[in-house]
Image (cartoon, rainbow, N blue to C red):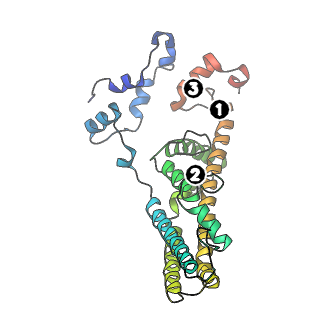
Amino acid sequence: MTYGSLLQSRLGLNFDTTKFGSGIDPYGDLQTRLQKQTKLIRDNTSTIYTAIANSSVTPSTYFQNPVASILSTINTTINNAYTLVWNYAVDLGEAGLDYILRPVVPTLPTTYNSLVQELTTDDTNLNGSPKAFNTFISHTNRLSNLSNSNKENRPSFSSAQSILQTIQSLIYQLETTSTNTVGSLGLGAFTSLFINSDLSTYNSNINSNYTNLQSLLSTNPTSTNPTINSGLSSLTTNMENLLTLLVTRREHDENFYLNAISIGEDFNVISTNKNYSTTSSMLASYLVENLIGTNTLKNL
């Protein structure tokens, strides 16, 4: 069943297509190849067609970020702990214990103070860069197909899976490695989506740190800096390790993606002639053979 030509209208092709000549079906098998392709749409065809044709698809209706919720929980706990410690220090200052003179920032441990600045989800940190939570959420939103990237070094769901499918096929054919290895390589730019178990551990630990800190400060209402420092020690360690995890996984995904692009570009340079092309790249073969390919390329 077909539904008209709304998708064609949305594409907006404005060209004298007779100029394409035989490039439209260079090998006379276009219909056969199209019929062999896996169906893009299996069920609810009318509903899907209408949504696509009217450009009314909202990504969040169909996709979710698997790490967003737990990161939000961790972020809230870290901010609550910071507020607790801040208020405790201010209360001491108002009590005349000379711990702090408002409105000076509480003299919290330097490492802890820096980590709060680096992690929490305010718009920017002290040097104007996006904070770690925000940066990681943006990264995993792109990988979850909730948003797209407008920068080449930022993998998105579509861009990453497209190049990695090519890399999987290439490595399987040229390096005859195991399917398990090839399958893992296909997820190499998506590792940030697979750390929920790690985040669950940090969530539990940081929440426990916060609870202990509340208890410590409530039972030492007139203590000063040493009490705060001892209460923040474990929390600081967990925050350091969490920051390392978020940065390491994000940078890995981005570097893996760039490496895949580099390999793909190298292969594409020498593979776009008829001797190496697959049925899915007949159009590329036609362009190389008839328009853009040098003799060096065509003679490979």
Residue 284: which numbered mark, if any?
3
Extreme residue toward the bottom, this view: 219
> Type of residue at label 3?
Ala
Q: CA distance from mark 2 to mark 3?
A: 26 Å
Residue at the spot 64% in from the left edge and 54% down from the top edge: 251
Q: Earlier in the sequence, mark 2 or mark 3?
A: 2
Residue 19: which numbered mark, if any?
none
> Type of residue at label 1?
Ser
**Dot 1 surroundings within 10 Å: few (below 14), some, or many (20 or more)?**
some
> Type of residue at label 2?
Ala
Query: Do the residues bearing badges 1 and 3 touch, measured as CB atoms within 8 Å?
Result: no
**Dot 2 surroundings within 10 Å: few (below 14), some, or many (20 or more)?**
many
From the image, state whether disc 2 or disc 1 is nearer to you.
2
> Is residue 234 placed above or below 78 in the rendered structure?
below
The total number of labels drawn is 3
Using the image as rendered, state which of residue 155 and residue 126 is in the foreground. 126
Q: Earlier in the sequence, mark 1 or mark 3?
A: 1
Residue 132: where, in percent of width, then height? Answer: 58, 58
Residue 189: which numbered mark, if any?
2
Q: Earlier in the sequence, mark 2 or mark 1?
A: 2
- Image quadrant holding the N terminus, namely top left
Q: CA distance from mark 1 to mark 3?
A: 10 Å
User: Which residue does the numbered mark 1 point to in the structure image?
Assistant: 271
From the image, state whether disc 2 or disc 3 is nearer to you.
2
Mark 3 lies on a secondary structure that is helix
Extreme residue toward the right, this view: 296
Q: Quadrant of residue 56?
A: top left
Residue 276: where, in percent of width, then height? Answer: 62, 32
